[in-house]
Image: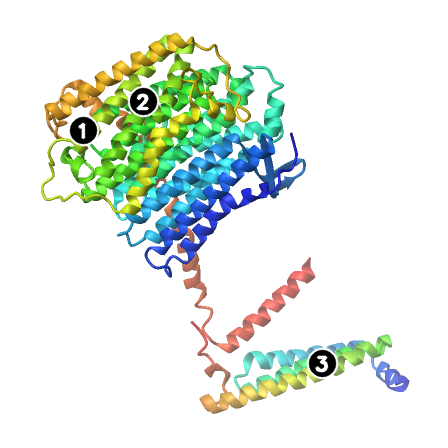
Amino acid sequence: MKDISSAIQLIPLEHYILLSVALFSIGLMGVLFRRNTIIILMCIELMFNSVNLLVTAFAAYHSDPSGQVFVFFIMIVAAAEVAVGLSILVMMKRNVDSVDINLLNRLKW
Amino acid sequence: MVGTIPNINLAYLVPAFPLMGFLITGLAGKRLKHNQGGIIASAMIFFSFIISVVLFYLLRSSGQDSATITLFNWIAVGNMNIPFAFLIDHLSLTMMLVVTGVGSLIHVYSIGYMHDDERVNSFFAQMNLFTFSMLLLVMGANYLVLFIGWEGVGLCSYLLIGFWFKNPAFNYAARKAFIMNRIGDLGFILGIILLFFTFKSVSFSEIFAQASLMHAGGPIITLITLLLLVGAVGKSAQIPLYTWLPDAMAGPTPVSALIHAATMVTAGIYMIARSSILYNLAPITLNVITAIGLTTAIVAAIIGLRQNDIKKVLAYSTVSQLGYMFLALGLGAYSSAVFHLTTHAFFKALLFLGAGSIIHAMGGEQDIRKMGGLRKKMPITYFTFLAATLAISGIPPFSGFFSKDMILSKAFEHNVILYFLALGGALLTCFYMFRLFYLVFFGEQRLAGAHPHESPKVMTIPLIILGVLSVFGGFLNIPSLFGGNLSFSNFLQSAVSSKVSEEISSTTEIELIILSLVLLILVIGIAYRTYVRKANLPARDGEPMSIWSRIVVNKFYIDKTYMILVEKPYSSFSNFLFNKVETKVLNPIVDGIGEATSRIGILTRKLQRGNMSFYFFAMVAGILLFIVFILTI
């Protein structure tokens, strides 16, 4: 544990922050501009994981294990979310025979 | 004085029985067979009567004057403490006996009278509710319980006047009665508030104990008594609030007998007699009561002279007799007023029930000009009606003679002019009653196609019992002149404090009685000559009349005056509010709010087009804006 923390601390904190922001922005852009629902789901995962990375980095720098514990929780919730998301995707494929998100436009006034 | 009387808690049962009857006939009315409702209701009132008689003997054998029975503590806020309590004393017992006794007879009669009505069970439910409220009114040990009963009887009166609600005129009459009573009730409740403000209590015993220490003529006590008087004037149909009572005849005839003759309209007299200690402290109010009573007695009697509807005649006669009771109250002769109330309950209930029997026989016809010759066809109704007519006219030894004579002699003690005015009213009463009597029972039958017949036993037996009471009711209170000892007045002595006045000598009294008797017989003779010998009929509608009789036929234009002074301005004001304020101001505002909301909705729903990408974009943009907002603060 001690070794990993010190190994993480070899790289300055700013780099972790910049990497996380870059990953998060890529994920966000994907969610906003892609039409394929599978890719949108993957981009959401990317955003999740950028946040996870940032949280572990901060946990190491502050020598506070609660941040890492928190990450485990996020991963479990994300796994559950993916299960739901993928099943929606399967239903979508069955019903409209496509994964284009813009076809899901029937629930409106 | 305070001590427990064994079994006095039976008093709970007196109002409980009618309440039970109301619940049974009201809730299970649809399941009951046609006649069961009436039998249950009558039995309940009769049980109450029996309990009242038992209470009477209990109180007498205990040697105490009154008993207070607390049911539960009703309102307890801070130092205000109002129990829900009953007061059993000689005055309330008298009223209880009258209400339940006459009430049960009228209930039994109604079984026959309302036999053909399809809503007969709800009729009896309402009658029982009325009796319950009336018993609360007379048994309450404080002004608030009295007020519950007061409002309850007002409600039942409204319901029962409008019992045949399919006729709009009857509904109008019911509303009129209700609104007229509201005016009085407003004064009454203000009086109660002022009482509470002054005495810090609404209980009779506490108020009267404090009031007996006050000196007479204080402004507050005068104001309180005047406000209470407003309530009594409304409930007991005195000038200026009497116009509802003649219209209230729209209800079924037993209702007129029970509510608008025997019991409810006497609530005002009961209330003033109950508050006699307060009224004795307010000589100005007493003078007002005297003036109101005398004016009402005479004006109503004059109007009664020219009425042609059998029930309207009796209604005006009720107003007039209530005026006599007010006169007695105003003279401080409270026990005489209650005595006249009691005898009036007997003979007026009998008159109304007799009228009901006649209307029943004539197939719903109420115009006395179309009746006639019923003497042979309806012998029981004829004889009982005769007894009641003699009683109301004040012919000795019928009950009305004793009670009316007491009031007249009290008037004589007070002022000779008062006496002659009251005597004049009594002569008018005698004339219109015999006019009615002769037109209905003598001469030839004038309605073609009618086959009058005597009513069934269930209707005639109450008539006979009331007839006996009307004949002998006066013997309850025989004045010393005839060797009696005024037992009724003495009985009430502990509950009401009548003013002591100088007795007139017995020779004067005999002279007065002979004078009134001669005049009464003269009046009966005139009525006989006009309506039997000459067989004159009252003018038909639309016939030309002298100015004087036109004024009388139109009831002194009092209804029209109220119409012009109150109803017209009120309805034009509400029309103004409706046409100008509501349609021009309020409606556009309310509509505008709705319109604006739906316009905004039309605009914003263009955003909701179901495009997921757009939703994502909007969400992210919103979060960014939010972050920017937080960071810039």
Residue annotated with mark 1: B438
Residue annotated with mark 2: B394
Q: Looking at the image, which residue is at 30% across and 47% down? A: B458
Residue B582 in sight in this render: no
Cα distance, mark 1 to mark 3? 105 Å
- Front one among B167 and B311: B311
Residue annotated with mark 3: A74
Name which quarter of the figure residue A6 lies in: bottom right
Q: Is residue B337 left or right of residue B457?
A: right
What's the colour scheme? rainbow
Neighbour class for label 2 at 10 Å: few (<14), some, many (≥20)? Answer: many
Cα distance, mark 3 to mark 2? 103 Å
- Which residue type does callout 2 highlight? Gly
Neighbour class for label 3 at 10 Å: few (<14), some, many (≥20)? Answer: some
Give the chain letter at badge 2.
B
Answer above or below: position of B198 versus B597: above
